[in-house]
C-alpha cells in the first residue's frame, strides 16, 4: 500500500546544500508576500514620476498626487495606475485557517486578459505619441478660454498662475 510522503521527509533526504537553498528561497518568497507598499512608494521605487503616470493615464499630475494620498481608492483606478507603471494589479485574500487566495474579477479571465492587452496598448500608444507635450497648466488655460467669457476673470486667473 502506498502512502503520501511528507514534504519534510523529502527535504530531509536531500543534501544539506540543497536544503539550505530551499530554505533561503522559501524565506525570500515569504518576504515578498510580507512586503507592502503604497502606490506612491511603488511608483518611487520604480523611479517613475507622477507626471509620467499622469501622462500615460491622460490625466493631470495633481490627480495622481491626490490618488496616492487617498485612503480608499477604487480598485479599477489602482489597476489602471499600476498598469500605467507597467505592472498588473493582483489582489490576494489571506485567512488564518487557509492558504492565501488570488482574487479575480467576476468577468472571465479571457475578458480580463483581453482588456489588459487593450489598455496596455493604449498606454504604450500614449507614451509613444510624437506630438509635443502640453503642460497641464496650458490645458487648463485653453479649457478656461473656451468656457469663460469674461476677460477680467481670465486676467485674474492668469495673475494667479
Image (cartoon, rainbow, N blue to C red):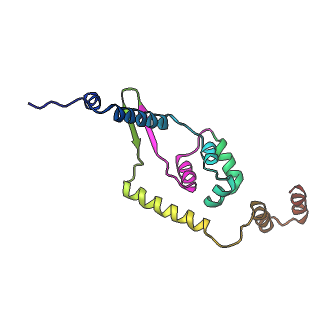
Horizontal side, residue 87 vs residue 96: left or right? right
Query: Which of the image's four quarters has the C terminus?
Result: bottom right
Q: Quadrant of residue 69?
A: top right
In the depicted structure, whether residue 11 falls above or below residue 78: above
Viewer-nearest residue: 14 or 153: 14
Q: Is residue 78 magenta?
A: yes
Horizontal side, residue 56 vs residue 76: left or right? right
Q: Residue furthest left?
A: 1
Query: Where does the image place residue 154, in percent across and percent down from the top left?
Result: 87, 62
Q: Residue furthest bottom?
A: 130
In the depicted structure, whether residue 64 falls above or below residue 119: above
Viewer-nearest residue: 67 or 28: 28
Report how many numbered discs are placed on residues in the image. 0
Query: Where does the image place residue 101, in percent across and percent down from the top left?
Result: 39, 38
- The residue at the point 64 percent across, 53 percent down is 48
Query: Where does the image place residue 17, in percent across and percent down from the top left?
Result: 36, 34
In the depicted structure, whether residue 95 falls above or below residue 109: above
Q: Quadrant of residue 147?
A: bottom right
Query: Which of the image's four quarters has the N terminus?
Result: top left
- Which stretch did the figure color magenta? 71-94
In the depicted structure, whether residue 76 falls above or below residue 139: above
Query: Where does the image place residue 99, in percent across and percent down from the top left?
Result: 36, 33
Q: Quadrant of residue 92?
A: top left
Q: Is residue 17 magenta?
A: no
Viewer-nearest residue: 77 or 25: 25
Amino acid at each position: 500500500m502506498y502512502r503520501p510522503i511528507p514534504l519534510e521527509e523529502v527535504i530531509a533526504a536531500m543534501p544539506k546544500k540543497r536544503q539550505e537553498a530551499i530554505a533561503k528561497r522559501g524565506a525570500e518568497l515569504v518576504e515578498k508576500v510580507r512586503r507592502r507598499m503604497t502606490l506612491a512608494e511603488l511608483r518611487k521605487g520604480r523611479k517613475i514620476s507622477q507626471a509620467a503616470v499622469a501622462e500615460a493615464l491622460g490625466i493631470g499630475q495633481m490627480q495622481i498626487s491626490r490618488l496616492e494620498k487617498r485612503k480608499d481608492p477604487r480598485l479599477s483606478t489602482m489597476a489602471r495606475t499600476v498598469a500605467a507603471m507597467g505592472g498588473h494589479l493582483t489582489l490576494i485574500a489571506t485567512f488564518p485557517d487557509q492558504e492565501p487566495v488570488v482574487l479575480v474579477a467576476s468577468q472571465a479571465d479571457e475578458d480580463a486578459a483581453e482588456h489588459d492587452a487593450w489598455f496596455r496598448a493604449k498606454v504604450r500608444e500614449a507614451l509613444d505619441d510624437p506630438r509635443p507635450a502640453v503642460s497641464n497648466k496650458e490645458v487648463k488655460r485653453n479649457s478656461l478660454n473656451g468656457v469663460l467669457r469674461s476677460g477680467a476673470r481670465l486676467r485674474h486667473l492668469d495673475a494667479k498662475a
